[in-house]
Image (cartoon, rainbow, N blue to C red):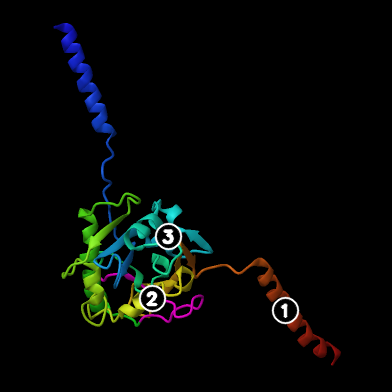
């Protein structure tokens, strides 16, 4: 009897260990000021769903000098594997996600303050040339747009993370305000009419490959013209890179510039000394 009891207790202990070792689905927490990456297809593979990723707080993209690898900074996981699984059909082909003209991406975020601060991407028309700023939004417009964004970000709380990233999930497109796809296709502007954001400018696409698209991130925290915080790009492997607008010029260029100014001042002073 004693031996039977010991065997039963040992089996129970092993079962408990096995349960503890089963990986739990990580919760996805969206916090105020976090920026969301959205990727959606307008046709073809994956056109019934949207890929959403919480890429980190806007404070990490404010006042940045140089470039940062966002995937590494915020442990985003393997976004490339998710993109291939959701939107890709053949590595290197014209139908791979990073070569699709019918695949779009954007960035957005919000806080819960009043008046609200909101953030939105704008695609660069020519990669390497900053996008023109969005129109300024007054308090009413910012608050209204924030509420529309909040409808989407609230879905992170009940989402199931993907196998490749604890910060990402696949959202099924629906005809309601919680659906990102609905927010950018229902009417002529994204996230309601108050934003004045056209979807074609909010989103970039991959018609010219991943190297042919870049998104500038704009901050709306007053009624004045929004500020450009910097530029996001994405590689074929799904690595996000952010380059801040506060980039410091190369030392050699700065030095040459100072020497040039000194030479001009010297030339101007010499005639005066001769007189």
Quadrant of the rendered image containing residue 201: bottom left
> Viewer-nearest of labels 2 and 3?
3
Dot 2 or dot 1, earlier in sequence:
2
* Mark 2 crowd level (few <14, some 14–19, many ≥20, 10 Å Cα): many
Start-end of magenta stretch: 114-134
Residue 238's mark? 3
In whole angstroms, how far apart are the C-alphas of marks 2 and 1? 36 Å
The answer to which of 137 and 107 lies nearer the viewer is 107
Across and down, in percent, residue 114 comes to 24, 69
In the rendered image, the residue lying farthest to the right is 274
| Residue found 33% across the figure and 66% down from its top | 39
Q: Which residue is mark 2?
A: 122
Left or right of 19: which side holds 255?
Answer: right
The C terminus sits in image quarter: bottom right
**Residue drawn at x 24%, y 76% as measured from the top left:** 185
**Residue 4 vs residue 36, the one in the foreground:** 4
The answer to which quarter of the image holds residue 225 is bottom left
Most common secondary structure along the magenta stretch: loop
């Amino acid at each position: 009897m004693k031996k039977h009891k010991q065997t039963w207790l040992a089996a129970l202990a092993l079962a408990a260990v096995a349960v503890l070792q089963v990986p739990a689905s990580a919760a996805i927490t969206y916090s105020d000021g976090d920026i969301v990456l959205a990727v959606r297809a307008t046709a073809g593979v994956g056109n019934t769903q949207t890929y959403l990723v919480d890429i980190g707080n806007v404070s990490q993209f404010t006042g940045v000098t140089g470039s940062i690898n966002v995937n590494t900074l915020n442990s985003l996981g393997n976004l490339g594997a998710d993109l291939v699984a959701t939107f890709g059909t053949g590595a290197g082909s014209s139908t791979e996600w990073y070569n699709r003209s019918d695949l779009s991406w954007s960035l957005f975020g919000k806080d819960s303050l009043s008046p609200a601060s909101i953030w939105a991407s704008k695609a660069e028309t020519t990669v390497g040339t900053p996008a023109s700023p969005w129109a300024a939004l007054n308090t009413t417009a910012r608050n209204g747009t924030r509420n529309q964004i909040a409808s989407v970000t609230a879905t992170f709380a009940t989402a199931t993370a993907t196998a490749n990233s604890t910060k990402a999930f696949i959202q099924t497109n629906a005809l309601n305000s919680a659906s990102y796809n609905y927010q950018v296709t229902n009417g002529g502007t994204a996230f309601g009419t108050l934003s004045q954001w056209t979807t074609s400018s909010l989103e970039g696409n991959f018609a010219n490959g991943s190297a042919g698209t870049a998104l500038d991130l704009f901050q709306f925290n007053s009624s004045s013209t929004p500020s450009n915080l910097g530029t996001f790009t994405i590689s074929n492997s799904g690595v996000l890179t952010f380059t801040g607008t506060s980039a410091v010029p190369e030392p050699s260029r700065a030095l040459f510039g100072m020497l040039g100014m000194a030479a001009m001042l010297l030339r101007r002073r010499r005639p005066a000394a001769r007189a």
